[in-house]
Image: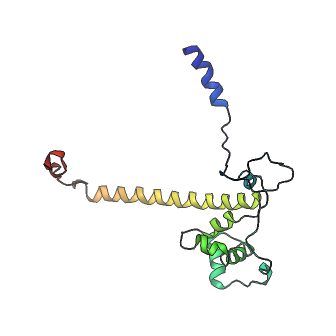
Amino acid sequence: MLKYSAFLIPILACHAVHADLTIPGLNQQPLNHFAIEDKTLAKTGLTVNEDELTSEQDINKITLTDTQLHEAKVWGLTADEEKRYVLLMQNKSKFYYKGLRQTPIDILGINARNETERNHFAELAARQEAQKVAKNIAWNNAFYKAYNELFVNVPVVGDFDPSPYSPYAHK
């Protein structure tokens, strides 16, 4: 048994793990990968990635306000990406995502027109999330260090009487 396990474990460890995204009820037929541009969306059963912008919405006719230009700079977006975000938030995305704490990058990534665009926004979001997490960890470390120096003799949890919570307390 030990020999069999020793042989099987390296084989399983070398196997590439791959998860397919499928949505029940959608077309699960084999894909013609040459005819489909957005293979990630196609795995869910969609063969056409419909852009949420309408034909009346022209990105070139929009002039960004100072606030919108600032927002673009804060999130690391180009002017055209910010314009697309502004237009998306005038359509379904306004109802789907407003109030859900989605960033402009999230909205643009969700509504990406192709895999390249989706990957661009995913990388941008990942870089910004890494910055945020690193700053949070640094802050937490500094806080706990300061707390422990200031309150060295104060217990974190004071005297506690568990008897009211005992199963024998309720008869």
Work out whether residue 75 or residue 135 is closer to the camera in this orientation and state it: 75
In the image, farthest residue toward the front: 25
State the image quarter where residue 78 is shown.
bottom right
**Drawn side of residue 79 relative to residue 162, left or right:** right
Residue drawn 22% across the image and 53% down it: 155
Residue drawn 41% across the image and 58% down it: 140
Q: Is residue 2 above or below residue 164?
A: above
Work out whether residue 124 or residue 93 is closer to the camera in this orientation and state it: 93
**Drawn side of residue 127 relative to residue 29, left or right:** left
State the image quarter where residue 5 is shown.
top right
In the image, farthest residue toward the right: 34
Q: Quadrant of the N terminus?
A: top right
Work out whether residue 69 or residue 52 is closer to the camera in this orientation and state it: 52
**Drawn side of residue 31 relative to residue 98, left or right:** right
Q: Position of residue 45 (x, y in %)?
A: 73, 53
Display colour scheme: rainbow
Residue drawn 79% across the image and 80% down it: 58
**Drawn side of residue 150 relative to residue 134, left or right:** left
Q: Position of residue 70 (x, y in %)?
A: 63, 78
Residue drawn 66% across the image and 73% down it: 92
State the image quarter where residue 116 is shown.
bottom right
Work out whether residue 71 or residue 102 is closer to the camera in this orientation and state it: 102
Q: Is residue 78 above or below residue 17?
A: below
Q: Position of residue 128 (x, y in %)?
A: 60, 62
Q: Position of residue 104 (x, y in %)?
A: 63, 70
- Disc count in the image? 0
